[in-house]
Amino acid sequence: QQSRGGSVDILIVVDNSVSMIDEQIKVGQRFGDFVSALNDVDWQIGFTTTDAREQYNSDRFGGRLLYLHDSNQRILNRHTLDLQHLFLKTINRERDQIFCDGSDAFPCGSNLEEPLKVTMQASDRRHQENSGFFRQDAALAVLILSDEDEGSTGPSSATSASQVISKVRSVFGANKKFTTYGIVIQPGDTACFEQNRNDGGEYGDFVQQLAQATGGFTGSLCDSDYSKTLRAISQSVRKILMVSEVLLEHPPVAGSLKVQFSPAINAVKWQLKRQKVIFAEPPTEDTRIDVIY
């Protein structure tokens, strides 16, 4: 078992409403913590906003990847020059409020938050504006930054976690490793809710549901420093890239299958499903795994 290497495409869905400027900057300031914890993972990052409107002829809405600041490129990777500066300037959407006139050409930042729907739209644009971002052999991680819920208040028409998961599976196949994370007003965190309610803040119920359904988690929007949350997300991404199942070449003869771990103290529970040995959790780094049948 190795925790080194692997590929992941990280889609950052950022709320570009006026109330989110400070939070955007806090994420940008901790970009170094985020990527350093990824270590030698082959990562790439794309940004889009939580605004799912399709009618604007703009790169900011409808799941389109944003252009990096002062660039004609949409994808950030570990070989990009001046990473920290580009990340901060791209995730900070203050200019959506400053350099806008409300027209199709220069639409303003909006108070329409639909990060789950946008995630689906982004995957639908994989052969268009988002070409080159979704790699076939890479895991997909989505990070949602918002102070409101899906559809702002989570109405009955809001995109659900199950819809997003179904979309990802239908587009990329069932074997695509897909995980969602969020920095939101966590459900039940009344102090954070009260801190943001005057700006229209809402509990991120739908974001948390998607995160939990895909093996991710959410951090608090009200943290003064996002370094702990971002490092935890990076570590989680590295974990999903580790071996969590073994595909056998043939169906095993009944009763013949043995799975051995060395050192034995790193043994984890496993089960056989058709021709796959599936571990309850990835064995720890440097564990030797022998599958005999």
Image: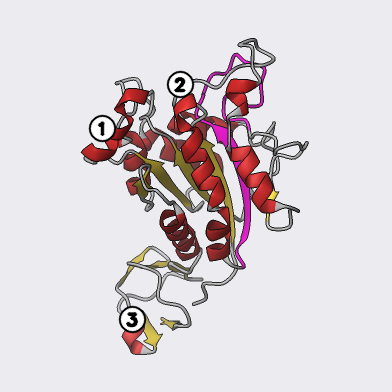
Q: Amino acid at mark 2?
A: Leu
Q: Residue furthest bottom?
A: 263
Mark with earlier residue (3, 2): 2
Image: 226 above or below 245: above
- Residue 265: x and y in percent read 32, 86
Does 50 appear in magenta? yes
Please tell me the numbered disc located at residue 267.
3
Q: Which residue is mark 2?
A: 112
> Visible in this render: residue 141?
yes
Label 1 residue SS: helix
What residue sits 62% from the left and 30% below the top?
64
Q: Which residue is mark 1?
A: 194
| Residue span colored magenta | 40-64
Q: Amino acid at mark 3?
A: Ala
Label 3 residue SS: loop
- Residue 104: x and y in percent read 65, 12
Colour mode?
Answer: secondary structure
Is the residue marked by circle 2 packed among few (<14), some (14-19), or many (20+) residues within 10 Å?
some
Q: Is residue 265 left or right of residue 131?
A: left
